[in-house]
Image (spheres, rainbow, N blue to C red):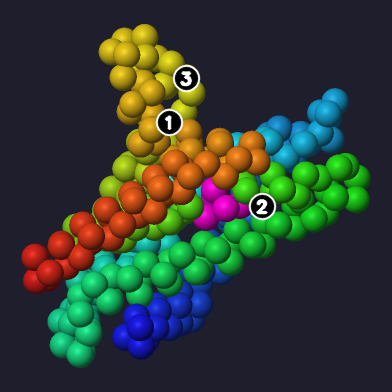
Amino acid sequence: MRNISTIFRREVSAYFNSPIAYIFIILFVFILGFLFFVFFPFFSQTSPDLRNFFFWFPWVLSIFIPAVTMRLWSEERRSGTIELLLTWPVQAWEVVVGKYLAGLFVIAVSLALTLVVPLSLASVTTIEWGVIFTSYLGALLISSVYIALGAWASTLTSNQIVSLLIAIAFSLVMVGIGYPPVVKFLNGVEGLGNFIGWFGTDSHFREFSKGLVNPVGLIYGLSVTVFFLVLNNLFVEGRKF
């Protein structure tokens, strides 16, 4: 645990000692607020609620999280510091987990700051805090998947932009295959929509946004996260950078 903690602190410092984390957090909160209050005007609704606010989470996270993860391994490869890092008395998996937790920390802070939206609306409408809690739990769960996926994508190249584009492409696919119109279309074509949709983040997040803590969703989030972390570890150890 000490080695993981050391890597975690190193990565968090790298985020917050540069503009990356601050730019990400500001843009993330601003865009979610813009989509909610402007694109789907909250106060023009006859029965205002936060469903449209949470609707955007899987899509916005799938685009923004790769911006956080793109540097995790790509920068190490570009600068050559990966050789120095792996000469430390640490296992590759400890570095993988430490970097993953650092990315998760940045996203958790970003999600926490978006709480200003439901908190500010609590004075003008009734807020179902149980639904708010489960929605944020679901958002954190799918964020975990995107972070692990993005960290793996970052091992594929020393170019951060290429890493970013790869992670965005995979993340959008994971959102899209669980999106109801896509599931319906695939059911009509091949009858595999429900099966394929199970692997999509959007389908599981919608369960949480309804106030349901579905054990299947928890298993999905944890298992897919572990899958990409294992893949990340295999690439780190196998490619030798």
The kind of residue on which mark 1 rests is: Gly
Question: Mainly helix, strand or loop, the magenta region?
Answer: helix
- Distance between the alpha carbons at the discs numbered 3 and 2: 27 Å
- Distance between the alpha carbons at the discs numbered 2 and 1: 22 Å
Q: Write down the residue under mark 2.
A: 133
Q: Position of residue 60 (x, y in %)?
A: 52, 45
Work out whether residue 195 or residue 165 is closer to the camera in this orientation and state it: 195
* First in residue order: circle 3 vs circle 2: 2
Residue stretch rendered in magenta on the structure: 136-140
Task: State yes or no: discs 3 and 2 in contact (Cβ < 8 Å).
Answer: no
The kind of residue on which mark 3 rests is: Pro
Report the disc number at residue 181. Answer: 3
Classify mark 2: residues with Cα within 10 Å, few (<14), some (14-19) or many (20+).
some
**Residue 158 visible in the current orientation:** no
Q: Quadrant of the C terminus?
A: bottom left
**Residue with the most extreme top position:** 188
- Does 139 appear above or below 13? above
